[in-house]
Amino acid sequence: MYLPTKDTKQHNFKTTKWVPQTDGTGPHTCPVNSVAVTSDGSRILSGSSDNSVKIWDADSETCVTTLLHTCSVNSVALSSDGSRILSGSSDKTIHLWDLTTGTCIRTLQGHMGPVTSVLSLGTKHIVSGSHDTTIKLWDANTGTCVKTLEGHTGWVDSVAASSEQSGIVSGSDDETVKIWDVNTGTCMKTLAGHGCSVSSVAVSSDMKCIVSGSYDQTVKIWDAITGSCEKTLLHSGWVGCVAMSSDGSHIYTGSSDKTVQIWDAMEGVCLNTLRGHTDLVRSLALWSEPDRPILVSGSRDMTIRVWDVLSGQCVRTLGNQFSRSF
């Protein structure tokens, strides 16, 4: 996910200068734009404006591998089988990496602007969103672009999908959320209501509920069937990222107010506010041990924090500081 450092309308990604990553095992030297967690919780992935993807050992809290793009890494994700890393970059490419060896298996090229968001859709496809205003559907095995979805009139900042359904959801600088049919490549519904760019979207496993976060400082919960906004949640800063629990009961949001908030999706009330980051929270990822949900957050403060959702405590910090509370 690509987010500007100040006002989204004034940001110029071509002139923004970050210090590139040079130390293969050190912390990130620039904002952390995206995080992901392996299914067994043993590895945490992070993408940064320092042009790198880092693989962290969750137990030792150390960076074990650093993978490099030539520009900012805006989004990281895992393949459906967990064996590969997907990374989208401002260099306009998507790299597929072997998680174990760190080898770049394939580079997907075709976007005309920075790639802002990537995800794996089942075992056969990869989805990407870009500043070129399009969403692309790629064959995961060949790296060929099989569909280009067009309809947004602004940068596509975020894409989401359900592994159980055939729909894609996208959020854009044109202030809308769109629902797409993967098979036909057509836009099935446009959700309008935000007053500024939509920075992040998430979707329930049954594709019935969509969550969107925006620079207008709100989080909206949408009924994907009717297209109506069911609830609007408020932050005290613009919303950089949203996530949803697998059962759809809880929503997680990160903001420029430096907090992560946990919400009851049905009631629309904030259950807890997690404090610790010192700058914008740009990305969230969920992982669950038995009866113990874990939340990972990435921030513009260059760190990754690991939170125990039930207690609301930060149990680890990866980056400029290292701590352990397990």
Image: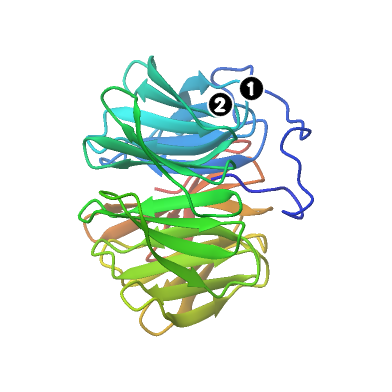
Q: Residues within 10 Å of mark 1 (few under 14, many from 20)?
A: many
237 or 58, nearer to the observer: 237
Image: 251 above or below 28: below
For label 2, the SS is strand
Which amino acid type is marked by label 2?
Answer: Ser
Q: Give the x, y percent position of residue 270.
A: 49, 78
Report the label total. Answer: 2
Q: Residue at x 29, y 49 (%)?
A: 182
150 sits to left or right of 259: left
Q: Residue at x 73, y 48 (%)?
A: 5
Most extreme residue toward the bottom is 267
Q: Which residue is mark 2?
A: 52
154 sits to left or right of 250: right
Residue contact at pointers 1 and 2, CB within 8 angstroms? yes
Image: 231 above or below 29: below
Task: Tell me how far mark 1 sits from mark 2, CA to CA.
Answer: 6 Å
Image: 113 above or below 100: below
Q: Residue at x 24, y 53 (%)?
A: 166
| Disc number for residue 138 | none
State which quadrant residue 237 falls in: bottom right
Q: Is residue 166 visible?
A: yes
111 or 223, nearer to the observer: 111
Q: Which residue is mark 1?
A: 21
59 sits to left or right of 153: left
Q: Earlier in the sequence, mark 1 or mark 2?
A: 1
For label 1, the SS is loop
44 or 192, nearer to the observer: 192
Q: Residue at x 51, y 57 (%)?
A: 171
